[in-house]
Image: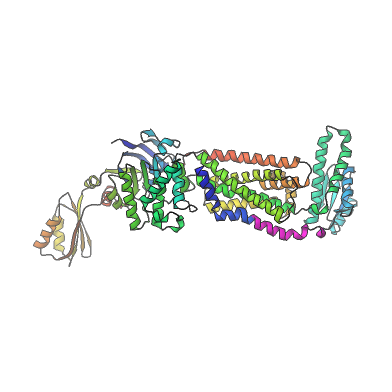
Amino acid sequence: MQIFKYQLKLLVRDRSMLFWTILFPLILATFFNLAFAKLSRTESFEVSHVAIVEEKVNLSFKTVLNALSQGDEPILSVQYTSIQQAKDLLKNNDIDGYILVNDELKLIIRDNGISQTILQSVMDNYQHKEKTMQSISLLKPQAIKDIVVQQNQDYFKSQKLSSLDVTVIYFYTLIGMTCLYGGFWGLKITNFTEANLSRQATRLQIAPTSKLKASLTGDLAAFICQYIAIVILLLYLYFGLGIGFGKQIGYILLMSAIGSYVGIVIGHLIGRLFHCQENTKTTILSSFSLFCSFLSGMMVVDLKYLIQEYVPILAYINPVNLITDGLYALYYYPTYERFFLNLTILCFIGFILTVFNILIARRKVYDSL
Amino acid sequence: MKNVIEINHLTKCYGDVKALDDFHLEVKEGEILGLLGPNGSGKSTCIHTILSLLSFDEGDIRIFNQEMSPSAYSIKAKIGVVFQDVAVFDELNVVENIDYFCGLYIKDKKIRQQYIKEAIELVGLEEFKKFKPKQLSGGLLRRLNIACGIAHKPSLIFLDEPTVAVDPQSRNHILEGIKKLNEQGATIVYTTHYMEEVEQLCHEIVIMDKGRVIARGTNDELKNKISLGEKITIVLNQKEEELISLLKADQQVISIQKENLTLHIAYQGKGNHLADLIDVLRESNIQYQTLFSERPTLNDVFLELTGKQLRD
């Protein structure tokens, strides 16, 4: 308890840590909000123009497209064309993209932008639900067609255009990045406990106190600090900036907790693996967090989709992407399948990193100090 | 008196370099043992290895008659260490720093508070209890460093160059504090390259070089081990070749060094040569400005044993 109390004091009294883990994400969120404020307003949305090239008839997809292109607030403007016509339209910038409908759906776009992101989002949504229905079809094949059509119709009809706010991805990546910033706390705790990293830790090592106990209390202190930082960010995003998270607050907090833990163990690992100055380690950690956030779509949201399509493994091992995608799935999809897939992979990454850390931290004597 | 530390055949290598080379050491209960050697002689490596912080290649280490190991908590509970580098937290004030490190050993809060009070008194930081380390001068910071290492009242204390870069006032305070700890019953291993401190403080001295013990004994015993008995310095009024010839003829004279009008004369043996030299000067009617005699220092011992200065 004595060690824990002081580890907590040491963490919360470090002003630079408080800046990077609490203030910096809030500042970034504010900038994001300013930048995307215009985009997120309903009236600023323009309908996405898309051409459909039907190489094979897909009735359920057609129904979804109809639902999205009709009503008071249509999302899509759809026209059915030949492949050549679609290519010409895209070349002349008359459409934002075209979808090849065959056994699988394929979206072709020329530029990156909000309209293209909406098209990608619609595709994602449909394909995810279609897969879910395919699973169900194994049990009740006779009912599947009606269910797909009905569910897609109901789902998309229930989504107002204003709620289809793709800019939330930017804020979700920010949450993911802030989770990884838990590594700063982890890095600091490693410095407190590894004798070859600081003289203070050398004192700990020569005391009759178990290193494992000191590490665990340190992790608990780090987790409390990090989780408070995340909750502050979530509260600011929700109440301050009005960012939508859906209604599954418990799952959001769960994802944030696991993400925070993964961030802390990444900090431990960087602290233990790299033999360099603390400042250099901090730079490595912040660069890593930023790179993961970049790959998750923080700067260019389409990059997230490109990676998911062409290098899916990169999407699955990127903790920021898993957090972003988990929150995104929670917000958009009526089922939890994709959320739990992301959460499970994140837990697995956390477990693997913990095992690595334990293996390294197990040593009790050093070759040099 | 029984041995508190026994080290035999200890060897520690960094690649091809032997930091400790068949190192032997015995420290008796209640003594202050000085580990003297130039920078890089292996003093800190020796302490780190004894404390099971560093791995070693050969040898055995016993403390309080038990084998030392990283998980020997019963031994660790009785040891205090003050490192050469200041090891305190900038985020905590003086009392909090001592409380944190003392808390690693003493769980009872009341006992700990009493120990913290005594440690603060010992190092003279009563007026700086609420100060953060960055608000303290170098000397006060060193005192805090010591308080953090000894607050839990260890019976064996390692002090690794605790007075490096310390002002004279703080140095005296630190040395007095170490004497007090010893008077209270603590056995102390004191490493330094300041021979004056060792002479002033230590009952027993071990001289190290290149990871080996090259001499051991009390201050007088070590000085008696070398041929040098007395050093006399004389500043003449003018060059006196006759005096140099007379000195060269004296079989007790080991060496004569000339620096303009100053002569440094080294004599062997225990006798007092100053009176004899004054007689020679009077008989030869040689005028001089200054004349003084010095006993050999530990630096002279080190110089004669290794051919180099302690602070090379």
Left or right of A60 in this view: A179? left
Tell me residue B13's x, y (percent): 41, 41
The C terminus of chain B - image quarter: bottom left
Magenta region includes residue B88: no
Give the residue at x 45% y 55%.
B130
Left or right of B224 in this view: A93? right
Front in this rendered view, residue B279 or B140: B140
Front in this rendered view, residue B197 or A367: B197
Q: Is residue A162 above or below residue B282?
A: above
Outermost residue on the bottom side: it is B238
Outermost residue on the top side: it is A139
What stretch of residues is rendered in magenta? A25-44
Tell me residue B41's x, y (percent): 36, 47
Tell me residue B165's x, y (percent): 38, 56
**Quarter location, residue A23:** bottom right
**Quarter location, residue B29:** top left
Left or right of A273 in this view: B293? left
Give the residue at x 43% y 44%.
B112
Give the residue at x 59% y 44%.
A265
The N terminus of chain B - image quarter: top left
